[in-house]
Amino acid sequence: MRSLYSFVVAVSSILPAVVALGQNATVTTTKSDRGLLQLAGSGVDGQILISDQDWWGVIRAAEDVALDIGKVTGKNLTLGNWSAGGKHQGEKRERRGPSLHGTGHNETEIKDGKTTVYYSYNPVTSFVNYTTGPAERFEGPTLVNNSPQKTVIIVGTIHKSPLIRQLAQAGKIDTTPILHKWESFISQVVVNPLPGVDRALVIAGSDMRGTIFGLYDISEQIGVSPWWWWADVVVRKREGVWALPGTKVQGPPTVKYRGIFLNDEQPGLTNWINSNYPPGKYGAGYNHYFYPHVFELLLRLRANYIWPTMWGSMFGVDDTANQAIADAYGIVMGTSHTEPMMRATNEWNTFGKQYGGNGQWEFDTNNASLTEFFTVGAERAKPYGASSLFTMAMRGNGDNALLLTEEEAMKVLQDVVATQRDVLGKVFNGTEVEDIPQVWCLYKEVQGYYERGLSVPDDVTLLWADDNWGNVRRLPIGNETSRSGGAGVYYHFDYVGDPRDYKWINTIQLEKTLEQMKLAHARQADRIWIVNVGDLKPLEIPINHFLDLAYDTPKWGYDSVPTWIKLWATREFGGEHAETITSVLDRYGMYAARRKYELLDTVTYSVVNYDEGDAILAQWDELAYDAQHVYNKLDDGAKPSFYEMILQPVLGGQVVNQIYVGAAKNRLYALQRRNKANAVIEDVLDYFKMDHLLTKRYHDLLDGKWNHMLDQTHLGYDLSWKGALFEGYWQQPMRNSLPALSYVQELETSLAGNIGVAVEASNATVSGDDAWHPNSGVTLVLPPMSPYGPKTRWIEIYARGTSGCSWNITPWSDYVVVSPSSGYTGGNNGSDTRVHVSINWSKAPPPTNTTTVNINITSSCADWGNYPAPMVQVPVQNVAAAKDFTGFVESDKHISIEAEHTSRNSAINGVSYTTLPAYGRTLSGVTLIPVLAPSQPAGTGPVLEYDIFTFTNTSAANVTLFLSPSLNQNGDARPLKYGIAFDDETPQVRQFVANATGGNLPKGWNQAVADGIWGLSSGNSTTTKHDLTKTGKHTLKIWAVEPGVVLQKVIVDLGGVRQSYLGPPESFRAGTDKTGEYGGTNFAGLDVKDVLW
């Protein structure tokens, strides 16, 4: 694949302490005796030489770099003007270029030997008709008109800078590798570039942003993070900056337009804006003082495109300088998928009636008014034509579908786009409409219209959308890849809508983003990548990752996420903590993405089966410990940034899980009438308070710099509402609240005595009556134990009265071991106790043998109320797989398999399987590559094989696959399917993602995206039935029929699978695990035996 970079130099011994993320090094902060050109530091009083004829945005970025170098070394560089002279002092000089082919709004003023650069524009004076007022301007940097002797850096744009042209004409630099290319640059040390300059680092850009990216490349390499302002990343001091030898050629980027959509910006971002900027006439102060912070961030991240806020704002109206400042910075402006022709939705709501007609957002009934509305949008954008990308067509009012039949809607949309293109042709007179960048977003129902024949002009970019949950709905197929307008993707890191809002903090798994966007790149959806980032602030890490992928997609392989995180962590916090931060963030991505925080509730994780709830908390505890450990070691200056991007999400995620698992335990304990139910309430209340304190701590950082940014509610979604497709209301709660909690009466004793007994895998309790075991029954049965099953099971002895009791547990057979075997529960000094049951297999009856062993429980208390004393039974199954068998062995009537743990997997005709590390909910994912491979027939295509050994004879074994919630992005002709068979069975082929029509999503989609998989609550589309009446060794075979199928886990249910969210822990693997050492109690493999609320 084509690399974005070309760099010829051998500098391994002098690489900088910080390298720009994913970029080749051109400068270093490590001192060397190799005679490197020193750009800054002790003894250097250098300047950046630039022409005042260059773009205002380039000169502004050069000033940023001059200041960045000062942050690192303690001394700023100055800006020198190469083209000074030719004008009298105090005179003005003005240049303007063609509006569609480039901004050109520079003005200069020369005074006292210095040249100040201005960007001038004419502000709009009417929001109904296009009129403008007298020119206004932004002041840019001031350049010193002096000799170039102090020059250490020379920078300019090929077609704008006479300085760069002179160097090229003199043969000092070769610009041909980047000539006429998009956003490219060269960087090299040049000897004697100008009279009086021995050496200088020369940066030449192919266009404005190419030059800007070359400049910011230096800043990032010397340790100035793109997030220095937005996330308060500290700049570490260095002795100096030196240029490395060699020539670097970089660009063009993989994706042409790469950007973010500030959306769903209430309450967080809007409340923050209200606290920091004066309000506009029509709403919050989203003005030209705010947006430059966003624009600078985008450029430092090598991005170029924005959809501005739109919920309660109007980019071109809230501040008439907004479009001008975007153009000046070099940012391409667009509008969201539902806002055509460079006008905000709220503009129609505010000014629409002034266009006459019926006032409706309906082109079929109000086309004359809307045509004028569109025209004003084009006219307002014309001065900034080179920085405008027009969204075409329209949806219904309020980002809904048009209130028309499909046939009517398609006809109307054809008319709308024809009218809009006619408007563009008239407004941009002299420019072919095909040369004006346009995009049509195929969002929701619009995709259905397109697939049913809606005609889109060939030069208009097709922007395919994901499902709002990170699963791309469709990508180019057939001749769609040959369209001159190309294709792109509208992606989401934030969403408001079904099945639930997710907009609080970061819940993005980078591995998922990587997998989906590499699909998009392979299928040539590479003209536009735009991602909905909500408030921006809590999503720093996935934004950075997404934009790096867009800039150079081939660089980042399927296993690249840890590498990327390590580079990111090194840049932000230094190499000494990078390994630990990488582990923390990789685990966080998995934990947070298992189920969005807003979707968690008390029934998500089981608190009785597979130690699931306890394992979840143990994972979060371990993660929080590791994150806190790094925080504690950081310098004070680095702590705010670490808290914002890492520690708060980790601690916040931990506390939300503690709340819901705690509430689940309270619910269970209250039903069991445990005294502990009340103490758990207090714990949950403490966690609830902690949730607030974590937010307050965030808001108080740096004297309240980010106050309100975490105002988003996230606890207490309404679960009483029953929707047609999903239970629970999708919209945010107006205030955080806890799930229902229940107290028990501690002043009274249970009718069944002062202590009770509960066991793993059951809600029941003895002695006494409940809904979970026969009335007056006194026996509870533990799940079976075998050499291939969990090492321990548990019994809990708990208080449910006013007095304490000592107790003893005595198995009837000595090979059943309990620990502890006695204790004291209740009263002032007693505590609930988890008793672990294990088997001494050397003493157990030899295989094959199945025995149920009774366990007596006696108490010092006189009685168990009016009930007999309880008894627990444990089935002991001493079985043995064949000695030479390697693979997964049944226990507890099931086998659970992580997808990557194949016995064998095959490659056929260059098509094979690859593992996606740390992808999904528990371990990883497995998928076909290359993603452009044709369909692979089940039975003959590449196969995943899993050897298993069974002891249970059943003709109805159910095999469920946990598959990522991907969609039929290859079109209805190639829906996602897999094949499955045991041994020599004829493969069963399952299309697990149903075809969907119009704007609809497939059956079970709400549940699939909530669960993070197809195969749990989304229906039985990933479950097949098989005859396994023959026990012993079998080979399970799975074929991914289509690329895009991602397998995470396999569960073979022989009649013993119990309810859980993540499925049973992975089963014993003969050849890998050893009997007596295999834990198997929980999916995480963590010790949770001391976890008892």
Image (tube, rainbow, N blue to C red):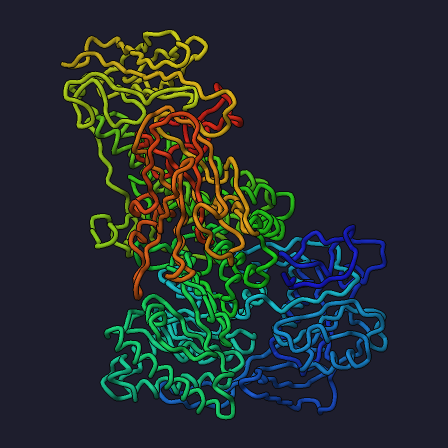
Q: Which residue is found at the position 23% from the left and 22% from the top?
A: 765
Q: What is the x, y in percent for residue 156?
A: 69, 76
Q: Which residue is found at the position 66% from the left and 66% from the top?
A: 67
Q: What is the x, y in percent for residue 1079?
A: 45, 25
**Circle count:** 0
Q: Which residue is found at the position 50% from the left and 50% from the top?
A: 928
**Is 138 situated left or right of 1018 in this image?**
right
The quarter of the picture where residue 343 lies is bottom left
Identify the image quadrant of the N terminus: bottom right
The quarter of the picture where residue 665 lies is top left
Q: Is residue 128 visible?
A: yes
Q: Is residue 281 visible?
A: no
Q: What is the x, y in percent for residue 570?
A: 62, 49
Q: What is the x, y in percent for residue 987?
A: 39, 43
Q: Considering only vertical position in the picture, is 515 above or below 738?
A: below
Front in this rendered view, residue 434 or 846: 846
Identify the image quadrant of the C terminus: top left
**Is 313 situated left or right of 917 in this image?**
left
Front in this rendered view, residue 962 or 906: 906
Q: Considering only vertical position in the picture, is 753 above or below 891?
A: above
Front in this rendered view, residue 467 or 586: 467
Q: Considering only vertical position in the picture, is 938 above or below 67?
A: above
Q: Considering only vertical position in the picture, is 582 above or below 112?
A: above
Q: Which residue is found at the position 33% from the left and 68% from the top?
A: 448
**Is 108 situated left or right of 671 in this image?**
right
